[in-house]
Image (spheres, rainbow, N blue to C red):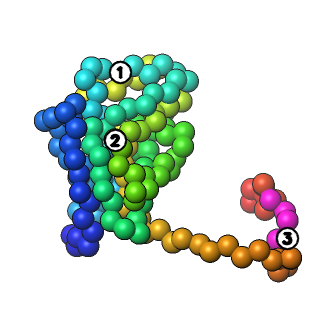
Amino acid sequence: MTRDATIRVTRLPHAEGLPLPSYATAGAAGVDLLAAVTEPLVIPPGGRALVSCGIKVALPPGHEWQVRPRSGLALRHGIVLPNSPGTVDEDYRGEIQVILMNAGTEPFTVERGMRIAQAVLAPVTRAAFQEVDELDDTSRGERGFGSTGLR
């Protein structure tokens, strides 16, 4: 695996003994984020919780972390990230936390060390904005929300 970026990590006291984020396989795009809860946390159906990961990071300049749900948790338990993908900006230095939502039908228990989300390091392109009187025409025009149909 080629490594062309370094993320500096500070482990917080409540994450003592937990591994740092890591890639589960050689071809994985995202690193697993772990729950640094000190006791089990139950999220009822329809409920939300802010779950600590117990780390702070310094991302490389020109990058963000895109925090995404884990497909297995979504499929088997209905655990999703309501703000997915969440963004960790390169200049953020607070604790990494993940908002989990239980869209399932049963209570879900978050336990210490559980893999709750994944984070993908992605380059950021910053845009310059130019005000104009009119935009160019396209074949789509102003048609939006469902205008292309289902088939």
Q: Amino acid at mark 3?
A: Gly
Q: Which residue is mark 2?
A: 95
Which residue is drawn at the image coordinates 86% and 76% (left, top)?
133
Q: Which mark is residue 118?
A: none
Rendered view: 7 above or below 100: below
Q: Earlier in the sequence, mark 2 or mark 1?
A: 1
**Position of the C terminus by quadrant:** bottom right
Residue 80 visible here? yes
Q: Is residue 147 left or right of residue 69?
A: right
Q: Quadrant of the N terminus?
A: bottom left
What are the residue bounds of the magenta stretch? 139-144
Question: Which residue is disc 1 drawn over?
Answer: 41
Q: For the point 51% across and 72% down, which residue is it?
A: 125
Q: Closer to the N terminus: mark 3 or mark 1?
A: 1
Identify residue type, mark 2: Glu
Q: In the shown orientation, is residue 148 left or right of residue 33?
A: right
**Picture coordinates of residue 7, whole percent (x, y):** 26, 60
| Disc 1 element | strand
Where residue 139 sits, quadrant-wise, is bottom right
Q: Position of residue 4 (x, y in %)?
A: 26, 73
Estimate the spatial distance between the alpha carbons at disc 3 and disc 1, rounded to whole Å.
48 Å
Residue marked by disc 3: 141
Considering the whole magenta stretch, tell me its main secondary structure: loop
Q: Residue at x 45, y 27 (%)?
A: 49
